[in-house]
Image: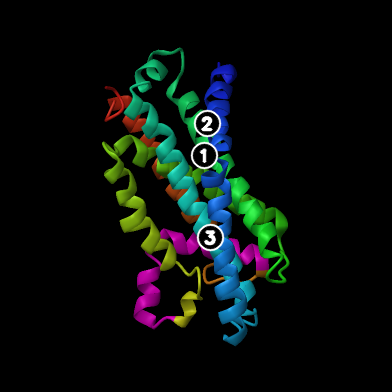
Amino acid sequence: MINFQAIKAIYVFEMTRTFRTLLQSLVSPVISTSLYFIVFGTAIGSRMQDISDIPYGAFIVPGLIMLTVLTQSISNASFGIYFPKFMGTINEILSAPLSPLEIVIGFVGAAATKSLMIGIIIFITSQFFIEISVLHPIWMISFLLLTCITFSLFGFIIGIWAENFEQLNLVPLLIVTPLVFLGGSFYSISMLPEFWQKVSFFNPVVYLISGFRWSFFGSSDVSIEISILAIMIFASFCLFIIYQIFKSGYRIKQ
């Protein structure tokens, strides 16, 4: 039987920590993304040609939302589980009557909630700069939620793997950020030379941004079915890794 009280305790603690650092947790990423809207959406976007009959300013909105949600999901989840390791309180969590599933739900659920909040706030903010409508709102929320959960799971893995703050920032800076920028945030994959188009399809972020963009405009670089399948495969892979971590105690048992 799932211990919902324990999950709630972890979840509430993590969310409370977020609101204690509201400026850093919510305001900062929203302001940063708003600057992207101003520069790329209005200033540069007005001089760019339409992409697939979509104004450039509107075209980049899904990519910018996804860019922020991906990075925030990883950051929130990795820091959430790393700090108990850093402070030594992870042993108290592991010795408590909690199953690995309940620990994951608590930490990942809080991280995904924070990212979802940021994504929704950024979407609302974009309306002040760019006129945009959502063709498939249910799919839009579904993709956003699925992305928040999946990359929070990935961030949870990074937080357990990291032994210091340098390692904690290593993967997001050296791997995730380049993948996001090369995943079609600011352009369509079809605009690339044929060779680089094929290379891009090995980038998992392409499928996330493509599917999310489809929910806005009804068109994408990759079919919606393949995008969903790619996300589910990555989520399953993350869950498998987390299962192995708790089973073996890799870098989580002090």
Q: For the residue marked with disc 2, what is the amino acid?
A: Glu
Where is residue 54 drawn, in percent x and y?
64, 79
Q: In the displayed structure, would residue 101 be above or below residue 123? A: above
The numbered mark at residue 111 is 1
Examine the residues drawn in magenta and state their main secondary structure: helix
13 on left or right of 215: left
Return the residue at label 3: 32
Q: CA distance from mark 2 to mark 1?
A: 8 Å
Mark 2 nearby-residue class (10 Å; few <14, some 14–19, many ≥20)? many
Q: In whole angstroms, how far apart are the C-alphas of marks 2 and 3?
A: 23 Å
Magenta stretch bounds: 192-216
Q: Give percent across and percent down for residue 11.
A: 55, 28
Measuring from the top left, give residue 234's x and y in whole percent: 43, 49
Q: Report the amino acid beneath label 3.
A: Ser
Q: Are marks 2 and 3 in contact (CB under 8 Å)?
A: no
Residue 216 in view of the camera: yes
* Number of other residues with Cα within 10 Å of mark 3, as a class: few under 14, some 14 to 19, many 20 or more: few
Write down the residue under mark 2.
14
- Where residue 106 appears, as percent x and y from the top left, is 52, 29
